Image (tube, grey):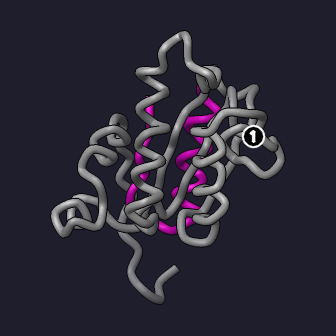
Amino acid sequence: MSVMVLGGSADERLQAAYAFHRESFLRRGPFICVDGERDQRRLLMALQEWNSPGPADLWANPLLAAEHGTLFLDQVGSLSIETQRMFLAFARRLVDAPMESEKPHWVGRLTVGNPEHLSTAVMDGRFLPALYDSLDKVRVELPARIAGVA
């Protein structure tokens, strides 16, 4: 089940995501953190690799590195629409993956974070409604941060 962590600072979102990982049966697996703004190219390449046949490079692919653990994607609202579409296809395959699929079924938890609530981005057409619905299963809302206040 996916987790969405909204508000707070980047460190607070990371700590909340890690708490879910640490308290779950996935705690023995890796906890991989990806920044949607800074690491978008790497994530897009990983999603393209996941959706293509053939072997994948474990070290460059955060999806494979997070297998049997947690993939925490912070600043999910920064993803381009193209990356969102590919991430949605990946997220849907977690639930709907046919047993005959060329790629093995990914086992792990998707946890996403964003400084602001994503409903405005959905209404403005900057975030895919289907991706929002897919990721918004367990929501953690942290107190909003005031600029310049730690």
Amino acid type at circle 1 is Ala
- Expressed as whole percent of the image width and height from the top left, the position of residue 97 reads 48, 20
- Expressed as whole percent of the image width and height from the top left, the position of residue 108 reads 60, 29
Residue at left offset 47%, top offset 58%: 83
Left or right of 132 in this view: 149: right
Residue at left offset 55%, top offset 11%: 100
Outermost front residue: 53
- Expressed as whole percent of the image width and height from the top left, the position of residue 51 reads 57, 39
Outermost top residue: 99
Where does the magenta region start and end? Answer: 1-24
Judge whether 122 appears above or below 46 on screen: below
Residue at left offset 30%, top offset 60%: 127
Is residue 28 part of the magenta span, yes or no?
Answer: no
- Whether residue 73 appears in this view of the structure is yes
- Expressed as whole percent of the image width and height from the top left, the position of residue 144 reads 36, 69
Residue at left offset 75%, top offset 40%: 65
